[in-house]
Image: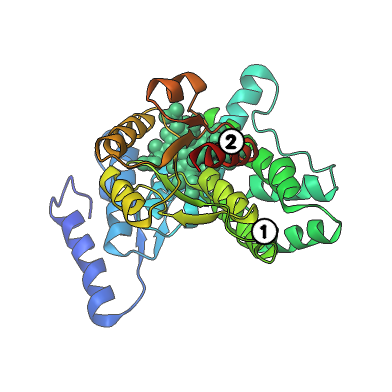
Amino acid sequence: MTVSAAPESAKETLKAIRLVKERLGLATVLGVSNISFGLPAREVINANFLTMALAAGLDAAIINPNNKAMMDAFHASLVLMNKDVRAERYIRRHQALTETQAVRAEGAPVFAAPNAADQSIGGRLKRAVIEGDEENITALVDEALKEGWEPIKISNEALVPGLEEVGRLFASNRYYLPQVMLSADTMKKAFTRLKQEMQGRKGPSLGKVLLATVEGDIHDIGKNIVATLLENHGFEVIDLGKNVSADRIVEEAEKNKVDIVGLSALMTTTVLEMDVVIKRLKAKGIKALTIVGGAVVTKEFSDKIGADEYGGDALGAIEKIKRLIGTHA
Ligand code: B1M
C-alpha cells in the first residue's frame, strides 16, 4: 500500500523483508514504486525506499532501469552494503556519466586510457600498475627479468612511472581511491617478486639503517623501495613499517644502536612529524644520523628540521646513506 493511504506500510514491508530472510531464509522481490502513489516528487520517496529495502535484505527490486534517481540509489546501496567490490560498478557508472557530459561540453572524452599500443614489456608493466592488474603483475616482472631487465630498471622505468600516472589520474578526478589502492597492491606484488630476486645478492653488512613512515601516514611504497635497495646494497635494514610513532622510532633506534634513521612521509600534513622525530632523537642524545624522504619533502625543509641528509629519489638516497655512514664511522 502507498504511504499516503497507509502510513505504516513502508515500515511493515521492511519488517517483512527482514523476517522472511531471518526466519525462512528465502529471497524476496518487491515492486518498489507503489509506495509513493498519491505524493509529489515520487522518485524521491521511491529511491529512498529502495535504499531502505536493500539495507533490510531485499534481493530483487522491480524498478524502472531508465530512471536515474532509482539507478543512482541502487548503485550507491551496493557500495554501502559492500556488494560492489572496490566500488567498481559505481565508479564505472559515474565515469561513464562524466565522460558523456564532457563529450557534450568539449567534444572529447576525459578518460585517457593508457597507451595500449605499447606492447613492450616496460609498457605492459606500466599498464598493469595503472590498471591494477594484480593477477598478471608477477608474471610480467618475471618476463622482464628474463629479458635481462635489472630490478632497479623495472622499478624506475616501469613500475614507479605507472604509479605516478595513477597519481595524476587521481589528482584530476579520473581515478578514485579504490583504484589507487588496487594499483598500490599491484605494485606491492611486483616488489615482493623483485625482493626475492635481489635477496641472493647480499654481501657483508655496511651498516644498520632504521626506516619508518612517520605517524599519521600510511604511504609506504617509496620507503619499501628504499628498504629493498638498501638491503641489496649490503645494509642491514630494520623496517618499522608505516604510521610509526616518534616514541617507537626513538626507542627502536636506541635499542638497535642503528647508524642511520630514515624517515618517509608523503603528505604535507605528516612531514611535520619528521621534525618531531628528529627533535626527540636529539633530545635523547641518540647518535644515529638522519635522512628524510618522500615526494613532498624538499631539501629546504630537510635543512630546516635539521636532518643530516635529504633523501631525494631512492637510488640517490642509497649513495647519500653510504656517504653518511662514511662520515659516521
Ligand atoms: Co595517497 N596521497 N592518500 N594513497 N597517494 C598522495 C600522496 C597524494 C599526493 C594524492 C593527491 O591527492 N594528489 C595525497 C597527499 C596530498 C598532500 O598532502 N600533499 C594523498 C592523500 C591525500 C591520501 C589520503 C589522505 C586519501 C584519503 O583517504 N582521503 C590517504 C592517506 C591516509 C593516511 O596516510 N593517513 C591516502 C591513501 C593512499 C593509498 C592507501 C590508496 C595509497 C598508498 C598505498 C601504500 O603506500 N601502501 C596511496 C597512493 C598510492 C598515493 C599516490 C597515488 C602515490 C604515492 C606513491 O607511492 N608514489 C600519491 C599521489 C602521487 O604521488 N602522485 C598519493 C610512488 C613512490 C615510489 O613515491 O613515496 O615519493 P615516493 O617515494 C620515492 C621518493 O620520494 C623516495 O624514494 C621513492 C622512489 O624514488 N623516498 C625516499 C621515499 N621515501 C624516502 C625515504 C628516504 C629517501 C627517499 O630516506 C629515508
Residue at x-position 73% and y-position 49%:
154
Residue 247, horizontal then vertical, whole percent: 26, 46
Amino acid under disc 1: Leu
Instruction: Specify whether 203 is left or right of 147.
Output: left
Which of the pair 180/266 is nearer the observer? Answer: 266
Q: Secondary structure at mark 2?
A: helix
User: Which residue does the numbered mark 1 point to in the structure image?
Assistant: 194
Pick whichever, 89 or 30, lies toward us. Answer: 89
Of labels 2 and 1, the one closer to you: 2
Q: Residue at x 27, y 37 (%)?
A: 280
Asked which colour scheme the image uses, the reply is: rainbow
The amino acid on which the numbered mark 2 sits, given as a three-letter code, is: Lys
Q: Position of residue 90 (x, y in %)?
A: 49, 46
**Label 2: few (<14), some (14–19) or many (≥20) C-alpha neighbours in 10 Å:** some
Residue 282 image offset from top left, x and y in percent: 30, 35
> Is 205 situated above or below 324?
below
| Residue at 84%, 42% in the rendered image | 118
Q: Which residue is found at the position 56% from the left and 31% from the top?
A: 98
Q: Is residue 193 above or below residue 130?
A: below
Q: Is mark 2 within 8 Å of ligand 1?
A: no
Q: Please tell me in which quadrant of the rendered image residue 29 appears.
A: bottom left
Mark positioned earlier in the residue sequence (2 or 1): 1
Q: Nearer the viewer, residue 179 or 62?
A: 179
Residue linked to disc 2:
320
SS assignment at label 1 = helix
Q: Is residue 67 visible?
A: no
